[in-house]
Image (spheres, grey):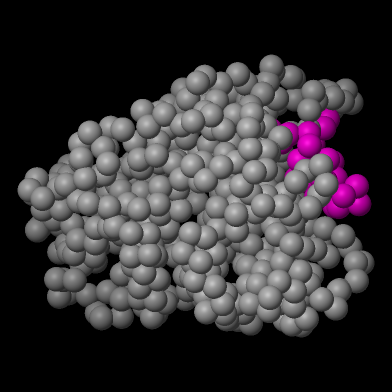
């Protein structure tokens, strides 16, 4: 029965959060798994259902205050809310002790385990099909193995030791699963990605499905995380991260956009710099980011001003960008003023710099946004390559390939800048803080490196003991993992 429930979730969720053409299915009613996996169309629908978990942290019911997605940026301490938040938000914004009963924790936990159950169900049922060719079956499984790795990678970084489950639930017995050690979770993630890597996927996929490029890029990200904290596997894994990132770069399947504005264009989704994206759709799953990042209180710069104020950079972080950095330019990563809606001759100054990365011109014409959200982009991969090599070489490298990877990202921000002869890990980390800011990457970087950007000095410093601009105290070890939600511990005492 439990397996049937999860199959139903995986299929019917497409109606509410299906995000792209390949997710536009029309399931009708309930079909048990035993009778469901009988045609390729049914298998495709089940695989599509496993993608819907990518959206879970970006869902919202009544405005920005109930979306759990922003918490990952609040934790860094480099942002704040213009719109007043309640105690649940402030625990993350201020770095107060996080109450295990905080409802946002349950949202993040479900964003791991609901889609993992869908993935397990597909893997378990797909293995018994006989009507598919082996090549078709392998490709379907490649997508699912990537997705399961994605969800577990998110969960283990946020919560640490968590249950590891790789088979579908078929009844209500033995549902109390103990926590597995983080290393065991990471080993499973790597195993899944290696399976996906050998599944015959294409290097790129313009529809937004999992591609070989996405698999290899995520594997590089996993390896560099395993090299750092908390596993601290060191040089062996820095070498693996460097080799895998170099493989993606050498494929020449991806490239940086010439202009930062291209990152926001719907016409360029799922290609070039965008290795893997959360698919959004105007009709079924709009992107909350554009309107959520508007000023609060309302200013007349937008067609729909009511839901802004969810996330803004702290002034200290904004000022940490060099004045010559193109990313700091007006309407690049940030904006400080904007023309009045329907009256462009009147320029409205903003009370503070706001985030422009997710501005959607189309949304200002029709009041809805279908802009994709980039989960893996090529700039991230280039910087992983550079960081892995510099770490492998003892903190500073003269490796030409790694330096070129870093310089591609840096030169776009500083046109005409000379390529250095040597590159330090700290140089790469700074570039990551600035290039990937407010893309839901920074907190994960801070966790694996145990480093922070000191916004006063512009230098990379130890995370433990550093007080970020929006926090009321310095970071300590106890701040590095989220508590497992109280509701889950009450249901499963083995999670204590």
Task: Examine the structure image and report whether residue 324 is included in the region drawn in magenta.
Answer: yes
Q: Specify whether 427 is left or right of 86.
A: right
Q: Position of residue 153 (x, y in %)?
A: 42, 58
Quarter of the figure with the C terminus: top left
Q: Which portion, as a residue range, is magenta?
A: 312-337
Residue 277 position in % (x across, y down): 53, 55
Residue 206 coordinates in the image, percent (x, y): 53, 64
Q: Which is more toward the observer, 448 or 394?
A: 394
Q: Position of residue 133 (x, y in %)?
A: 24, 79
* Image vertical order of residue 243 relative to residue 49, above or below: below
The magenta stretch spans residue 138? no
Q: Looking at the image, which residue is at 28% across and 32% down?
A: 487
Identify the residue at image location x=25%, y=81%.
134
Q: Is residue 126 left or right of residue 241?
A: left
Residue 21 visible in the displayed image: no
Q: Residue at x 37, y 32 (%)?
A: 100
């Amino acid at each position: 029965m439990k397996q049937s429930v999860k199959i139903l979730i995986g299929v019917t969720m497409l109606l509410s959060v299906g995000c792209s053409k390949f997710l536009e299915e029309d399931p009708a009613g309930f079909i048990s798994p035993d009778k469901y996996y009988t045609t390729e169309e049914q298998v495709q629908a089940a695989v599509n259902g496993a993608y819907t978990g990518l959206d879970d942290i970006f869902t919202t019911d009544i405005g920005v205050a109930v979306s759990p997605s922003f918490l990952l940026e609040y934790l860094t301490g480099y942002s704040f809310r213009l719109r007043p938040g309640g105690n649940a938000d402030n625990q993350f914004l201020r770095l107060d002790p996080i109450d295990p009963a905080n409802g946002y924790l349950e949202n993040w936990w479900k964003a791991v385990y609901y889609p993992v159950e869908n993935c397990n169900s597909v893997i378990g049922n797909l293995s018994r099909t006989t009507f598919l060719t082996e090549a078709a079956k392998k490709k379907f499984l490649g997508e699912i193995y990537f997705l399961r790795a994605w969800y577990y990678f998110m969960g283990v970084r946020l919560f640490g030791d968590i249950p590891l489950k790789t088979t579908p639930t078929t009844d209500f017995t033995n549902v109390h699963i103990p926590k597995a050690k983080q290393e065991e979770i990471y080993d499973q993630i790597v195993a899944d990605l290696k399976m996906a890597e050998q599944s015959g996927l294409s290097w790129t996929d313009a529809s937004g499905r999992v591609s070989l490029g996405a698999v290899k890029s995520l594997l590089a990200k996993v390896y560099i995380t395993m090299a750092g904290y908390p596993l601290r596997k060191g040089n062996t894994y820095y070498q693996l991260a460097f080799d895998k990132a170099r493989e993606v770069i050498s494929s020449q399947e991806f490239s940086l956009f010439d202009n930062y504005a291209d990152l926001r264009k719907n016409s360029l989704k799922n290609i070039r710099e965008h290795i893997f994206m959360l698919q959004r759709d105007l009709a079924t799953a709009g992107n909350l980011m554009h309107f959520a990042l508007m000023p609060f209180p309302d200013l007349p710069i937008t067609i729909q001003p009511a839901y802004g104020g969810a996330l803004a950079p702290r002034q200290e972080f904004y000022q940490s960008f060099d004045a010559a950095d193109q990313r700091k330019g007006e309407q690049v990563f940030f904006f400080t003023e904007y023309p009045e809606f329907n009256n462009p001759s009147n320029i409205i100054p903003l009370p503070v710099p706001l985030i422009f990365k997710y501005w959607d011109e189309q949304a200002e014409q029709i009041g809805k946004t279908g802009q994709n959200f980039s989960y893996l982009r090529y700039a991230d991969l280039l910087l992983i390559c550079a960081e892995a090599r510099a770490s492998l070489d003892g903190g500073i490298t003269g490796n030409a390939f790694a330096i070129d990877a870093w310089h591609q990202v840096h030169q776009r921000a500083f046109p005409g800048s000379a390529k250095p002869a040597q590159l330090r890990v700290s140089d790469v980390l700074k570039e990551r803080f600035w290039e990937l800011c407010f893309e839901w990457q920074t907190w994960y970087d801070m966790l694996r490196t145990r480093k922070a950007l000191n916004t006063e000095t512009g230098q990379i410093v130890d995370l433990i003991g550093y007080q970020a601009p929006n926090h009321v105290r310095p970071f300590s070890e106890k701040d590095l993992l989220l508590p497992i939600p109280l509701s889950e511990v009450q249901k499963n005492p083995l999670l204590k």
